[in-house]
Amino acid sequence: MSTSGNNVVPLPGVHVRANVRRPALDPERAAALRDALRGLRHEIEEWFEPAPDVAGSRRDEAFDWMQLFDELRHRLGTLGMIERSGEVDEFGLDAVALLRARTLLDFLVDRYWRVDLHGEESLPEHGPVLFVANRSGLLPWDGLAFAHRFLRVRPQWPRTRFLVADWLITLPFAQPTLARLGGVRACRENTDRLLSRGKSVLAFPEGVKGAAKVFRERYRLQRFGRGGAVRAAIENRVPLVPVGIVGAEEAHPVLVKSRTGGRLLGIPFVPITPTFPLLGPLGAVPLPTKWSIEVGEPLALDEVGPEASEDELLVSRLNEELRDRIRDLVSQGLSRRESVWG
């Protein structure tokens, strides 16, 4: 590395960024500094040198203090940031975190829930796509499992992002964890930004009403609101694809809802399930139900212009059609499995 005509040799173990200019160091002073560091290392080696035994020979096994010294020096030099990922996008998805979670996600998808995916052949070869699915439970296991399973049939697509309700994002530690794994706060602005950047999105128009269903009301679709998903697909010129997810609602069967406890914690309600709060934190572990994901044909939006998003009658009709298709896909998924457990 040459600076102002002087050749400066980097010190051992010191990492210098190529695009960062550092002040030039006089060669004589650099040599003196290297000699001083070598002397310090030699003194440390003498301080921690293993004492000879009775026969005058050294002990074969001794703690490597110099390795510890080098490791600490390296950690201090990087301020402990060496494990952090540099591949984090603007929505917080962390490539390193996904890689570390891959073993667990593979286990959940392949062995624990045994997720089957049907109907992917009806999808276009290229994205992005706006998926719309039924909401299944308070925790976003459905979005996480769909994104991981779908990546296998479209490995060339960017990982599908799943939308997460506001109340869940505000819970301690939830937002950074979900963001690293592909979760994004549910709002129209985020949906538009993701689609415009070529990333597919999984939305849940039922919202909290769908997540708050008790066990006896499972798989009964709630209202889809005012057609936000339909408008997003029309304005962004992307396919609108219905998805039916079966199995996730039994993974956390809600028997009773405690709204008083929910108000105290700042969430819609506290769910009472067969395992929570009886088993404490272990009650958050989902049950090993059998899952089926049904992907339907995209809605016909090819001949609909962006201005159609202002047509309330058209949006309402498409919204109801989308809901009917998802209900049919859920019924189809229920008919595929022999029981809740497979």
Image (tube, grey):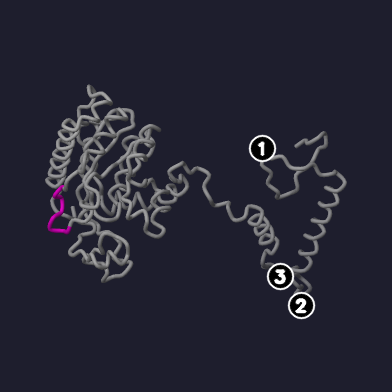
Residue 272 seen from this side: no
**Depicted 249 relative to depicted 158: above or below:** below
Residue indicated by mark 1: 19
Q: Earlier in the sequence, mark 3 or mark 2?
A: 2
Residue type for callout 2:
Val
- Camera-side mark, 2 or 1: 1
Q: CB of mark 2 within 8 Å of CB of mark 1? A: no
- Find the residue positioned furthest to the bottom: 54
Foreground mark, 3 or 1, reads 1
Q: Residues within 10 Å of mark 2 (few under 14, many from 20)?
A: few
Question: Which quarter of the rendering shows the N terminus?
Answer: top right
Sequence-earlier tag: 3 or 1: 1
Q: Quadrant of residue 253?
A: bottom left
The image shows residue 233, relative to residue 260, as above or below, that is above
Q: Alpha-carbon distance for marks 3 and 2? A: 10 Å
Q: Residue at 21%, 47% (x, y): give it.
A: 206
| Residue 253, visible in the rendered structure | yes
Find out whether residue 147 is within the magenta segment.
Answer: no
Furthest toward the right, the residue is: 28
Q: Residue at x 30, y 30 (%)?
A: 235
Can you give x and y, in whole percent of width and height, for residue 87 in the image?
50, 42
Between the residue at mark 2 and the residue at mark 1, the CA separation in whole angstroms equals 56 Å
Residue 149 placement, left or right of 18: left
The three-letter amino acid code for the residue at tag 1 is: Asn
**Dot 2 corresponds to which residue?**
54
Crowdedness of circle 1 by 10 Å Cα count: few (<14), some, many (20+)? few
Mark 3 = which residue?
Answer: 59
Q: What span is in magenta? A: 214-221
Image quadrant where residue 56 sits? bottom right
Distance from label 3 to label 1 (Cα)? 47 Å
Label 1: which secondary element: loop
